[in-house]
Structures are given as structure tokens and as C-alpha cells.
Image (spheres, grey):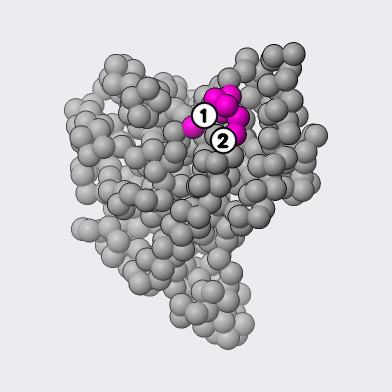
Amino acid sequence: MERMQSTWENLVEMDLSESGIRPVALRELAGMGLDLDSILDMPLGYSQSNGTIALREELARGYPGASADHIEVTNGTSEANYLLSLALLRPGDEVAFEVPNYMQYGGVPESLGATVKPFRLRIDRDWEPDWEEFERAVTPKTRLVYLSHPNNPTGSVLTPEAMRRIVRRCEQTGSWLLADEVYLGAEIARERTPSFWGMSDRVIVTSGLSKAYGIPGVRIGWIVGPAAVVAECWSQHDYITIGPNKISDAVARIAVRPENREKLYARTRAILQHNLPIMREWAAGFSGFLTFREPQAGALCLMRYQSPTPSFQLSERIRVNQSVLIVPGVHLGLEGYIRVWLGGKPEFLREGLRRIAIELHAEIERLHG
């Protein structure tokens, strides 16, 4: 998926493969207290490699019981996840991996010599885990369990009992639970998603500014975990990107202030609440060919289509014929689906959907012609 996006996202006329909300501008952040003049005068030296103390202390306020020593600031959530792989995984380890998902942990552990054992979320159970698969995937051999919560790409949120069941199993097996919570705060109509943080000393959380905050361009993410694990990730960080960008750290210190975080989350919610009815109306126009379980959180719509055509082939037709990029379900571990962005400007979304509809109607005609 990442290779497809990086190849085509700047060449197509319309990129609907995005996964966040339309970005916030620096001027908007200035209205929240960002001193642009001080940034213009800032010497562009190295920043503190694990994140400034001020930023880590601000982040720790959002995770009860955490201190700055429990936080590592990274270049995006993806680097946070990657550092944890380097710190925790060794050849021969096993990783349990929720599917469908952001597929980073479908590949990174394998590159380090670990074995990945998937367990599915079941659409017929409102995207709850297949518990039999989960029990088989998470054993005393399991070093780490990875899930995204809220989930990418389904937009689903686990029930409190499901969360407790996952944590209990990790405690029983001695596995680390890595909860990627980058979509927490992007709820569309429901209450705030509870964090896994604090449910066990086996829990590690990653997050960042890219999705719910609407600030992907500064590339700020973070790890929240036991101090010893975070210290090991800091050591790994020294060998990769060294540390976060100095300007980005300054921007993040403003964005994550509680009052600003709530403003940014509210902005995200308003955009998604406005756009979801557009997507609902559009999908309903295909007389059952296209269906989706509406997301509870996140700027993603995972849609099932009623055709044997592989999702990559269908997505390629849309890209080539309509200059619109979407994500094929096969890139997310779920064939027969497409993932369409929900977080753009309404007029952009409507035009992109209009173009996608041309190819979907052509697919319907091929099936029934």
C-alpha cells in the first residue's frame, strides 16, 4: 500500500487513498497559541532526540500514571511502531496481528526474523475479533500482539469486554500488547474511545498527530510504555533518525495542550459528520452492489463490492481511467473491499466519488452484460 501511494498520490488528479483528516494550517495553530515569530527566529539545530521534556510532559498528562520517562517522541506513529519492533523482537519470536489492519506489522516483524500469526476481525460480529483465532494466535510463544484501536480500515471500536479479554490473554501469555491509537479522538458520533493505557503493565501505546489531530506534515508520533522499554526504543532511535524535527516539536507542544487537542478533535468530528452522509447517499445509489458498515471513528470507509474482480485490479482501473487513487482491500488483508477517504473537502469528495462511480457502474454492466 505504501509503495502504491508514494508512487501515485502526487500524480493522480484526486487522491482518495488518504487516511487522515484534511490538514490544519500553521495559521490555524497560531490562533491556538503557536508563536510563528519565535519559530522564524529559532536556530535550526538538533532537538532533543527523544523529544523535548516540555513535549513529553505535555503528552504524559494525557496518560494517567505516565511521566516524561514513559514517553518517546518519534517521527510519526509508524516510526514509533518500528522502533518497538527493533527493541522487542528477535528471530524466532511470534507476533499476533489483527486483520484487517494497517499492514506495517504484517511486514516489519518478518523482516526481523519473527513469525506473524494473524487473527481476524469478523464483520458478521460487528468487527469483533474471531476469538478462536485470537486464542490460537496468542500463546506463550507470542512476544507481541499488534492492533489498531480505533481500527484502520474498518473504523470499528472494541467493546470494553473485548478490550479486557485481549489484555487478560496478553497477561496470561506474557505478551506485550501494542495498541496503535492514532485514530483515538476521531470519533464521528460516539463517545471518546477508551485507551488501552493503564489496563496492564504489558500495554504499550503508540499514537501521533497525523490522524485525529489533522497534522500529518510535522511527522510527530510517540510511544507510551514502561520506562525500560521506552529507554531501549530511544537507543534504537539513535541509529535511525536520531530525533524529531525541532520545528515539529515546537508545533506539537501547542497541538497537544488539552484545550487545543479538544479543539482539533472537534474539528475532525465536524468534518467527518458532514462527509459521512455524502458517502452514505453515494453508496446507496448502487442498489446493493456496494455496502459498508459505517465507521465509528476515523476518516476511512471500508466498502464491500459484489464482484469477483480482485480489488487491486478494480482500483487500478479507477486510477488509470479516472485519475483517482483508492486503496484495494487486498493491501489491508481483506479481499473484495475498497477503502475510500472520508476526510477531504466536500466538493473534492463528491467529485472523486462521481469518478469512482463511473468505473463501478462499468463493472456492474460487465457482470450483467
Amino acid type of the residue tagged 1 in the rendering: Thr
Which residue is rendered at x = 52% and y = 41% of the image? Answer: 280
Which quarter of the figure is the N terminus placed in? top right
Q: Are marks 1 and 2 in contact (CB under 8 Å)?
A: yes
The answer to whether residue 239 of the structure is visible from this angle is: no
Percent across and percent down for residue 290 are 56, 28
Residue 203 in the image, given as x and y percentages of width and height:
28, 42
When asked about the image quadrant of residue 94, the answer is top left
**Please, what is the dominant secondary structure of the magenta stretch?**
loop
Which residue appears at 37% of the width and 29% of the height?
127
Magenta stretch encompasses residue 329: no
Q: For this view, does 111 lie left or right of residue 322? A: left
Say which element carries label 2: helix
How far apart marks 1 and 2 lie (CA) works out to 7 Å
Q: Is residue 189 above or below residue 177?
A: below
User: In the rendered image, which residue does mark 2 sit on?
Assistant: 283
- Name the residue tied to disc 1: 291
Q: Nearer the viewer, residue 173 or 348?
A: 348
In magenta, the rendered stretch is: 285-292
